[in-house]
Each structure stands twice: as structure tokens, then as C-alpha cells.
Image: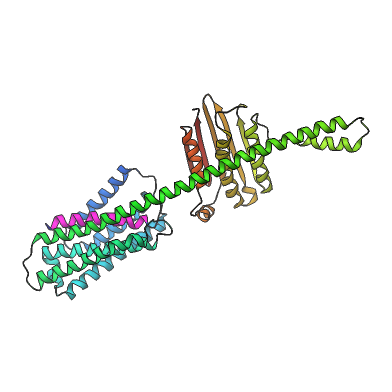
Amino acid sequence: MYYFVEVACVIAEIWMIHMFLGSLFNKRGASLLQRIILYGVFGGIITVLSLQEDMAFARLGVAFVGVWAVSMLIFDARMLQGVLSGVAFCAIVAVTDVGSAIAFQSCGVDSSALMANYASRALYLVANHILLFGIVIIICVINRKSHSRMSIKILLPVLPCWIISILLCFLFAWQCFVKDFEWHPLFLIVLLGLLYTNIIMIYFTNKTSEQAQIKKDFEIAEHHYAMQQEYYDQLRVQQEETRALWHDISKYLRAAQVDSTSVALTEVQEMLDSISCVVDVNNRIVSVILNEYFQIAKNSGIEVEIDVQVPSELFVTAADLYVLIGNTLDNAIEACVALPEEQRKINLKLKKHNNILFYEVSNPYTEKHLRRVRGNYHGFGLKNVARCVEKYNGKLDITKKNGVFRVVAHLNSL
């Protein structure tokens, strides 16, 4: 029974480590198999050391290395962050061990008997991990603003069950080792059940909260996407009306210019003739979009290089082109503005091959800028881009490497 309790507590501890690191860092794109292998190896080593006598410090050292490895491979922690996370979790474990031992001694359980007797040791392990569970959940709630979706609302329903579990552990210890109450393995099964009941309650409550938040984010993104489409439709109509107006004015002036001596009219005509698209890529919609953002980039001191080869008609709607190009250029310009002027450069490619539209935009960036712009509503632009690409059964690839942020999209003809 003791060995079963050790394995069960190690599994619970691995889950707590995952929750603890999840409250501090964002997840990487590790597959389920990779996570199972890493956690399996880590848990196996911890279990072997737990079953050996006088291996507490070795177990603590392996726990430190394991937390560091998980933070680097499963989560996006940096080297120093991983080390500090390992130290923090091991400190929590050490404090919990000492606190549990003191609590058991206060109940009249001798410390030497606590380590020698398998029954008392198993009871101590369960109580220790229930206490550790409570501390980890509190830390997750404290860190909820930055990464975790846990909140006080999640903690409150679990708190009474957690307190009752702790009290039962000490009550059983007092009854069995002070009052000589007959020991029964069923006590441990009940306490383990309470431990895992707490874990399952937190897990499903947290998942429900995440699903509700995802639904809320999706609804906001839907509204944002619809507003963008409406705005871009209106902008396209306005630009086309403006171009038509300039064209009509030019014709009227030519009709009014009755002789070549009309210097004023000649100068006005030359000015009107000079008004043209900064970029003309053989597609009116793409040209309008690029002209708008080229002007913004020019005013911000950003160099823009383009390689656009598209026909006059595309299978992508005007609104979707605005979403795709507009959002990515918005982000690129915003990132470049945070850099010194000599580093501000955007590269854009747009080509159509057979029934596929290839789009790529890249720009330099700083990690400081990315951390600063993260917020509750930041990122809806790229979410809308992803939805736009998905609409055309395409593929979206976003990479950050060597100081360059790159968005590559392939859209397929419907």
C-alpha cells in the first residue's frame, strides 16, 4: 500500500509542477508524446528515489533539474527563469515538508516513527501533498494576471474540500498513533481520493473557465473582424470615388484649357497629372491597400520593399485582402517604429501561382516591444488573419527568428 501511495503522490506532484510552471510561462508547441515522455522519465526517477531511504536531498536535486527541464522544453522559460523556477518549487516542497512534519509532531506523532513506520509515512506523504497542492494553487491564482486563467472564483469552491482533507489527515494520524486506533489501509484510500478530488475539481473548473474565456475572445474577434470588413469596404469605396473625382476634374480642366497660354491652368494640369498611385501592381484593390500603408510607412521613416506579381482579378475578396495585408502591415509598422530609423525595413511579397496566392511580410523587431504590446486585446489582428487564411483552406506560418518577425500565408482558390 505504501508503494501505491508513493506513486500516486509522485503523479500528483508532476501535475502540480505543470500547473505551477503554467502560471508563470506560456506553453511551447510540444506534442502530447513529447510531454508524456518527459514527464514519464521525470516521474520515474522521482519515484525510484522516493522509495529509497536517505535520498531526500538527491530527490530534491532531481526535482530541481526536472522543473528546470520542463520549464525550458514544455514552456517558454529562458535559462535563468528556468533555474529560478526550479529553486522556487524546491523551496516550496522543502517548506511543505517541514510544515507537515511539525504539524504531525504537534499531533503527538513522533518524528522517528513517522519515517520508520510505513503506515505513518504514507499518511504523512498524503498530508504533505495535499498541503503542497493548496500552496501551488494559491501561487497560480496570484500569477493569474500574466499567464494563468485561474482566479479566486476557481479557488473558493475547492478551499473547503482542501481544508477538510488536511484536517482529516491530522485526525487520522492522531487517532492511529496517539489514541492507538486500529489502522486500516482504507484510510489512505480515502485521503488519496480527497487529494485527487481536489485536483480533478481544479482541473475541470479551470478548463471550464478557459473555454468560457476562449468563447468570449472569439466573440470579440468576430465583432472586430466584422468591423474591419465594414471599414475596409467603406475605405475602398471612398478611395475609388476620390480617384474618379480627380479623373473628372482633370477632364474638365482639359476642356477649359482653350489655349496654351493659360499658365495657371497648365500648372494645375501638371499637378493633377502628377497625382497617381505610389504603387501600381496591376490590381486596383492591392494598389489601394499598399498606397495607404506606404504613406504611413513613409511618414514613419520605414523603408518598404515589395515583390508583387498578381493579376487584375483575384479570388480573394477586397475585404479579406484588407484583413490579410492591412493587419500584417499594421503589426510590421508598429514593430519598426520601436526600432532606430536605420533598422526600419519591411519586405512584402505577394504572388499568385495557379490557384494559390502566396503572401509574405517580414520585419525586424525587439523582444522588449513584443512584451510591451501584449495585452487583453492585442493579437486580434493576427487572429483575424488566421481566420481569413482558414476561410480559403490555406496555411499560416508565423515565426520569430534572429530578430525577424515573419508571416507567411498560402491561400487556396475556393
Q: Looking at the picture, how far across and down is residue 245, in whole percent?
A: 75, 36
- Range of residues picked out in magenta: 2-22
Q: Looking at the picture, how far across and down is residue 184, in whole percent?
A: 8, 62
Task: Looking at the picture, tell me which residue is in the foreground, 231 or 379.
Answer: 231
Q: Look at the image and say whether residue 17 sits in the magenta stretch.
A: yes
In the displayed image of the protein, which residue is found farthest to the right?
261
Residue at 22% from the left image edge and 69% from the top image edge: 100
Magenta span main SS: helix
The answer to whether residue 362 shows anywhere in this view is no
Q: Looking at the picture, how far across and down is residue 309, in whole percent?
A: 61, 29
Corner quadrant of residue 330: top right
Position of 238 with respect to 221 (left or right) is right
Q: How many marks?
A: 0
Residue at 26% from the left image edge and 52% from the top image edge: 42
| Residue 203, placed above or below residue 155 | above
Position of 216 with respect to 301 (left or right) is left
* Quadrant showing the N terminus: bottom left
Residue at 56% from the left image edge and 33% from the top image edge: 317
Corner quadrant of residue 20: bottom left
Task: Looking at the picture, tell me which residue is in the foreground, 23 or 254.
Answer: 254
* Scheme of colours in the image: rainbow
Q: Look at the image and say whether residue 58 sits in the magenta stretch.
A: no
Corner quadrant of residue 8: bottom left
| Residue 349, placed above or below residue 327 | above
The answer to whether residue 130 shows anywhere in this view is yes
Q: Looking at the picture, how far across and down is residue 386, in whole percent?
A: 48, 40
In the displayed image of the protein, which residue is found farthest to the top?
354
Residue at 66% from the left image edge and 41% from the top image edge: 292
Task: Looking at the picture, tell me which residue is in the foreground, 155 or 46.
Answer: 155
